[in-house]
Image (cartoon, rainbow, N blue to C red):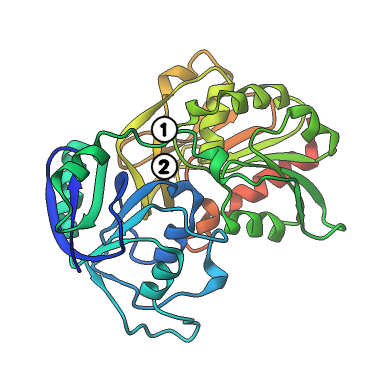
């Protein structure tokens, strides 16, 4: 079936459509060469239509063990060439079959370079992928609809959960704002057992579990959509060591009195250079975020910048001047290095050993 992408600015890109009814979402792009299944199932991509810049997608198939959640959260995908004959010893099926199974539409045979340039020039925006013959009135009505907000409460766990060995060195309370499977595995591999809490859990409930440390996870959307999370984080500062990643990093900044802002087209990919200002070393990192911490807003807080994006200078990490509180904007567990950034989990362990 022929299809098209219609952006809010009126741009139209045609291709072939794998799907049914038109789908509305925020159109973004990811520059990673691999990881399409992880991207599709990352809760941080909730309600977004993702343009993959790498030209061939699906060439190594799908493998259930690398999914980041039990189901995809992306609204749709836009790709160049969709491979239907994958080759990989772990392959369990085609990416096309995987998307059909979960009802995720895909527009393919598209000039993804042109789509990406449009987003880079004009910023991320609403868009629709749909059959080519979709009536203009239907498209207009969809584009007039607001994008979903507060996606965190749609992706967070609905009940308290437990993972890991009871004999583990550390007990970590995880605030689930849309946590990835690889983050949980990395914490376990670092010697932690986990108690996983819904995003709206009260600080008193978390502290009652008597954790050695508190982890603030990644998640989708605007951190300002969940002011209740900021309030609970405020109550936890100084009570236990805290480590935040991505959304957790942004929520921590807000809880400390800082501010966040929306990036023009975000950071999404596995090739973003970040400098650790403490050592001068540059790391290649995996990133997925549309918002960033406003560095100027940290001036009147007790947080200091520890990591900075080499590309645009935005804040990629921070640490409290006196308390065991740290956060990072990128995803150390994704390991494009491949293991260069796991030292951050070691820093978290060191904080838990010392306590507050």
Question: Residue at label 1?
Answer: 292
Q: Residue at x 60, y 52 (%)?
A: 343
- Residue 326 location (% of width, % of height): 61, 35
Q: Residues within 10 Å of mark 1 (few under 14, many from 20)?
A: many
Q: Secondary structure at mark 1?
A: strand
**Alpha carbon distance from label 1 to label 2:** 8 Å
**Left or right position of 66 against 147:** right
Q: Residue at x 47, y 45 (%)?
A: 330
Question: Residue at label 2?
Answer: 289
Circles 1 and 2 in contact, beta carbons < 8 Å: yes
Residue 197 visible in the picture: yes
- Residue 224 location (% of width, % of height): 48, 26
Q: Secondary structure at mark 2?
A: strand
**Left or right position of 256 against 93:** right
Q: Most extreme residue toward the right, as rendered?
A: 167
Q: Residues within 10 Å of mark 2 (few under 14, many from 20)?
A: many
Q: Quadrant of residue 114?
A: bottom left
Residue 283 visible in the picture: no
* 352 lies above or below 15: above
């Amino acid at each position: 079936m022929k299809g098209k992408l219609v952006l809010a600015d009126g741009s139209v890109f045609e291709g072939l459509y794998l799907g049914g009814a038109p789908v509305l979402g925020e159109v973004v792009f990811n520059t990673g060469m691999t990881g399409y299944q992880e991207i599709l199932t990352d809760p941080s991509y909730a309600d977004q239509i993702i343009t993959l810049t790498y030209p061939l997608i699906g060439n190594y198939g799908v493998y259930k063990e690398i999914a980041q959640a039990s189901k995809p959260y992306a609204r749709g995908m836009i790709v160049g060439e969709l491979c239907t004959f994958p080759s990989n010893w772990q392959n369990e099926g085609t990416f096309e079959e995987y998307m059909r199974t979960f009802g995720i539409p895909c527009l393919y045979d598209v000039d993804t370079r042109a789509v990406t340039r449009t987003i880079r020039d004009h910023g991320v925006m609403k868009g629709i992928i749909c059959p080519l013959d979709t009536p203009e009135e239907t498209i207009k009505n969809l584009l007039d609809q607001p994008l979903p907000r507060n996606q965190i409460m749609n992706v967070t766990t609905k009940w308290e959960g437990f993972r890991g060995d009871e004999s583990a060195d550390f007990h970590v309370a995880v605030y689930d704002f849309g946590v990835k499977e690889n983050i949980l595995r990395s914490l376990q591999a670092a010697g932690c057992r986990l108690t996983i809490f819904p995003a709206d859990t009260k600080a008193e409930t978390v502290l009652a579990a008597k954790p050695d440390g508190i982890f603030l996870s990644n998640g989708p959307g605007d951190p300002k959509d969940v002011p209740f999370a900021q309030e609970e984080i405020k109550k936890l500062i100084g009570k236990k060591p805290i480590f935040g990643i991505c959304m957790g990093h942004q929520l921590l900044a807000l809880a400390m009195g800082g501010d966040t802002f929306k990036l023009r087209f975000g950071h999404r990919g596995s090739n973003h250079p970040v400098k650790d200002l403490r050592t001068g070393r540059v790391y290649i990192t995996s990133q997925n975020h549309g918002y960033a911490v406003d560095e100027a807003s940290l001036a009147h807080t007790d947080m200091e910048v520890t990591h900075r994006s080499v590309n645009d200078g935005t804040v990629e990490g921070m640490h409290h001047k006196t308390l065991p509180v740290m956060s990072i904007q990128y995803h150390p567990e994704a390991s494009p290095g491949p293991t260069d950034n796991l030292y951050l989990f070691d820093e978290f362990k060191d904080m838990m050993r010392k306590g507050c």
